[in-house]
Image (spheres, grey):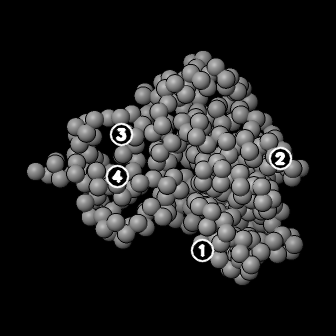
Amino acid sequence: MIYREYGKTGKMVSAVGFGGMRFDISKSDEENAELLRYASSKGINYFDTAPNYCENRSEKIFGIAFKDMPNDFYVSTKGMPTQYDTKEKAKDAVKRSLEKLGVDKINFYHVWCLRKMSHYELAMKPGGQYEGLLECKEEGLIDHIVFSSHQPGHEVKEILQEGKFEGVLLGVNILNFPYRWDGVLSAYENGYGVVAMNPLAGGAIAKHEKELHFLSMHGETPTEAALRFNIASPQITVTLNGFTTKEQIDMACRIADKGTTFTEKDLEKIKKHLGENMNAVCTGCGYCWDCPMQIPVPAYMQFYNDKQMFGKSDEKLKKELKRIREWGFLAVRKGRAKGCVKCGKCEEACTQHLPIIKRLEEIAKWERSIER
């Protein structure tokens, strides 16, 4: 396992991190906790979660695992400024996380999911979340205050220049790096910890290995290439992986042990194959799930990736849409794209700033055509 210093904190963290967003929730908490212990035994020491992950079970699963971890570890969790908009709420959230995690201290606490500068300003207001986190730090409940961002690079840079945080969590992978790398470099070059999420674009890379064959080199699969891109990049401190199996952990750890960085020539070759649309691929985070019309927005957006990533024709997409409505993941869903009332709730929640309403309108036209 590769270990790197997290910014200027003095903490040596594993290049592979365990992201607690994608547990198999059909399994028991104890079964999922065993996966964390296995990761620890393989050398992973950075464990990242959040209160709402996996139907609010993730922090609890972490807490079960932490009672009997094979090795020392660092824990990371989060809180949104929109949810904890006063210092009192922020402090209460930290204490609730500490109780669920079963630890005395949270090593890295994120001001979570900044999508625009107004979210940052909300966190930093007098008597707001950041002030509460500072008090928690003074009380020994938090080691380091960091933030997670889904903003463009220049806004990330602007926040870093304020000097309030010690690290940043960003969504960056082999498909979108041409549009996200400036934020990574800005953080790295100024001594901040850089944690990367969504290394497989929310599973899109693993799902479309055939179409993404150009990512592969030296006999590796596109999935392995994508993981190697993040894990072996010296500018990225930790790459979070949403593990669901021990085999996935083994793959990531093997890449950390043997993976080599991409050369400039390698990257130029990949850039030639990537279109601008790769920056607008849905990563499947699921934050847009709470639709008042019961439209399965995340499922529709994952379906739309086929057009966004590979330019599939409308006819092919209609055919696929008909199949998944009859036999696939849309078969038992109540809501349909045509039911969208344009309330904007999904777009407000979207970490990728995707034009969800416009995409749903397009999908609704396809649906109407196959219903005739």
Find disc 3 in the rendering and name its residue: 307
The Cα atoms of the two marked residues, 3 and 1, are separated by 34 Å
Q: Crowding near pointer 3: few (<14 within 10 Å), some, many (20+)?
A: some
Q: Which residue is drawn at 29% across and 55% down?
A: 361
Q: Which residue is drawn at 71% across and 55% down?
A: 158
Residue 7, image x, y percentages = 82, 48
Amino acid residing under circle 2: Gly
Amino acid residing under circle 4: Arg
Find disc 1 in the rendering and name its residue: 83
Viewer-side label of 1, 2: 2
Q: Crowding near pointer 2: few (<14 within 10 Å), some, many (20+)?
A: some
The Cα atoms of the two marked residues, 3 and 2, are separated by 39 Å
Q: Crowding near pointer 1: few (<14 within 10 Å), some, many (20+)?
A: few
Q: Do the residues labelled 1 and 2 touch (CB within 8 Å)?
A: no
Q: How many labels were placed on the picture? A: 4
The Cα atoms of the two marked residues, 4 and 2, are separated by 39 Å
Name the residue furthest left.
Answer: 372
Query: Quick one: 299 or 60, which is closer to the camera?
Result: 299
Q: Earlier in the sequence, mark 3 or mark 4?
A: 3
Residue 226, image x, y percentages = 58, 33
Residue 93, image x, y percentages = 68, 74
27 lies above or below 134: above
